[in-house]
Amino acid sequence: MKQRGFEVVSAYRDAGITLPERKTPRSAGYDIAAADDTVIPAGEIVLIPTGIKAYMGPDEYLGVHIRSSLALNHKLSLINSQGIIDADYYDNPTNEGHILLAVINHGVNDIVIAKGTRIAQGIFYRYLTTDDDYGDIGGQLQRTGGFGSTGNS
């Protein structure tokens, strides 16, 4: 039985996508790479496709963090600081759970990210809920959209 991991989304199935992996035995994060060549203009925000989706337990999420070398050397960051990929984002009907990274270029020069460049790290986390939390809200609400869709039903 699958517990947590990564898969390639169908739109990128034949694109030579490498699934995220930890580079050392004590690395916390799974390196996530760009699925396409992407230009991030100075001062702009761009969605970088990864070609992957993540599956996990119902009480987990995938935290996505920019790689420190890109932040330091190229003045890049995720626009929301840390991306949060909810468990129910996986295989949603709108985009199949494709992880897209919203990256901002704080610099004065355009930055070119080549396909395969490791741009972020994903770390699986467990989370806690409050005593009066209803979990799945009584089964009433289901995710119906993709990127940024929580609460839009």
Image (spheres, rainbow, N blue to C red):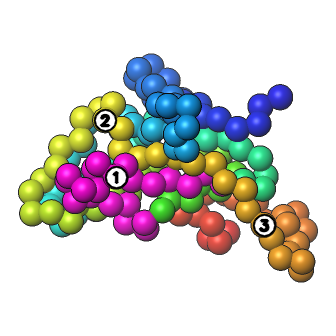
Nearest to N terminus: mark 3 or mark 1: 1
Per the rendered image, the range of residues in magenta is 61-81
Residue that lies at the very extreme toward the bottom in this rendered image: 132
Q: Which residue is mark 1?
A: 68
Q: Amino acid at mark 3?
A: Leu
Q: CA distance from mark 1 to mark 2?
A: 13 Å
Q: Which residue type carries mark 2?
A: Thr
Percent coordinates x, y for residue 57 in the rendering: 77, 47
- The amino acid type found where label 1 is placed reads Ser
Q: Quadrant of the C terminus?
A: bottom right
Name the residue that disc number 2 marks.
117
In the picture as drawn, the residue positioned furthest to the left comes out as 109
Q: Which residue is mark 3?
A: 128
The residue at the point 78 percent across, 66 percent down is 128
Rendered-image quadrant of the N terminus: top right
Residue 83 visible in the displayed image = yes
Tell which of 122 and 45 is nearer to you.
Answer: 122
Q: Residues within 10 Å of mark 3 (few under 14, many from 20)?
A: few
Where 80 falls versus 32 (above or below)? below
At numbered mark 1, what does the secondary structure look like: helix, strand or loop? helix
Marked residue nearer the N-terminal end (1 or 2): 1
Left-right relation of 21 to 46: right
Gap in angstroms between the C-alphas marked 2 and 3: 34 Å
